[in-house]
Image (tube, grey):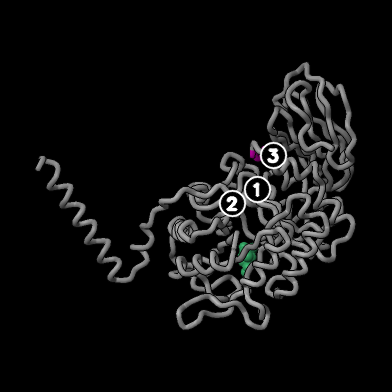
Amino acid sequence: MNRQALPVRFFRAVAAGLLWGCALAGTASAHETLKLDAPKPDLAPTPPMGWNSWNKFGCNIDERIVRSQADAMAASGLKAAGYRYIVIDDCWQKSRDADGNIQADPERFPGGIQALADYVHGKGLKFGLYSDAGALTCGGRPGSAGREFQDARQYAKWGVDYLKYDWCHTGTRDAEAAYTIMAKALRESGRDIVLSICEWGTNQPARWAPKAGHLWRTTGDISDLWESKKDWPIGMVNILDLQAEQWRYSGPNQWNDPDMLEVGNGGMTTTEYESHFSLWAMLAAPLIAGNDLSRMDADTRRILTNADVIAVDQDPLGQQARRVWKEGDHEVWARPLQGGDRAVVLFNRGAAAAGIRVSWNQLDLPADLRAEVKDLWTGQVSKDVHGGVGGTVAPHGVLMLRIRQPGRGAMAGSQ
Ligand code: GLA
């Protein structure tokens, strides 16, 4: 026996005893020491795209609506544009059976979750559910606290591909530990399941969430309105402002989530929804539609399926935009894209049309560049552009541009 062995053994024994003590006492801390063994599955190399029931339907969700959204996603051009996940948010759950297995609300989901997942998969789409790290969900349904492994096994059995995991009724739980447990449970479930962390940015998620999940919310809930002057509800531009400093944490398989889209829900104008969609694409945000896909008007469909804007969101480099300039109501957001392109949004928050301009220098582009510039909303391409780009931006509107440096790769995403 060498001289180190005894103390090492002694401390191991003491540590094991302490862990046992916790386990016997039934405290959360024995669980909360769990470590992630399996690596995070590579399920979100680009930001997830899909639909979620909450923004439009809240707790008024049922299997008929979910099927209609899957039908519409497949038939409306959204699937072709890259949308994949159909996610049922809160209120699908009702109770647990005698063995503790989570049960769907039998009145709203009489066919059961498995049949619904099969239906969604049958459309070539992926299926997601919602739960919560507390005893109850935000809507007061059974949460997953203490049942993480049992629930993850159930989700895998049903064919769940995506879990949004919320943070209501969690008391004094430690967020990192709680989300790590669910991450472990999902990784051991035998199925690839995206973990969408939803603790509203209240526990510094950028510190720990990239290890556990594929995306994490950075703020409270979005509302279908342009701007709020109060703390709540939170308008679209209020959420935008809270993203400006988050860019360094985002990247493939670890996306900042500024919350789901409100495009098409009726609280903003078409111009404002174009801005919302453009800015979310600049943020490399998950593009999770939150409207009724079965009743989209032409503008909503046009916005949600704009291939050039989506290509910016889905750019494989995965670099979130930075706000490179702001003066009063006028802003410039920019992000580098794979192959040397730049995506730029000239954003006008004001009530009057405004001329906004950005120079190559501000975009970290060579001063002598003669670029090809595409307007991603009109489709117009300008060649031999030098010095910078600019134009008149409508009130509450954007000019969204893709700048290509000739000779440095193709204008990916342009059509
Ligand atoms: C929280 C989340 C929302 C939604 C609701 C459901 O507020 O942040 O996105 O999931 O709960 O109750």
Which residue is labeled 3 in the image? 315
From the viewer's perspective, is 298 left or right of 80? Answer: right
* Secondary structure category for the residue under label 2: strand
- Looking at this view, is 197 or 73 the one in front? 73
Q: What residue is drawn where x is 60% and y is 52%?
A: 218
Residue located 72% across and 69% down the image? 66
Q: Where is residue 40 in the image (x, y as percent from the top left)?
A: 50, 49
Q: How crowded is mark 2: few (under 14 residues within 10 Å), some or many (20 or more)?
A: many
Q: Which of marks 2 and 1 is nearer the N terminus?
A: 1
Q: Quadrant of ligand 1?
A: bottom right
Disc on the earlier residue, 3 or 2: 2
Judge from the rendering whether residue 182 lies leftward or rightward of residue 359; answer left or right.
Answer: left
195 up-or-down from 311: above or below: below
Query: Where does the magenta region start and end?
Result: 318-323
Q: Which mark is residue 47?
A: 1
Magenta-colored stretch includes residue 320: yes
Disc ID at residue 215: 2
Contact between marks 2 and 1 (CB within 8 A): the answer is: yes
Which residue type does callout 1 highlight?
Pro
Picture coordinates of residue 170, whole percent (x, y): 48, 67
Q: Which residue is drawn at 48% across and 56% down?
A: 187
Give the camera-side residue of 119 and 205. 119
Q: Which kind of residue does numbered mark 2 sit on?
A: Leu
- Within 8 Å: ligand 1 and the Cβ of disc 2? no
Q: In which quarter of the image is the N terminus?
A: top left
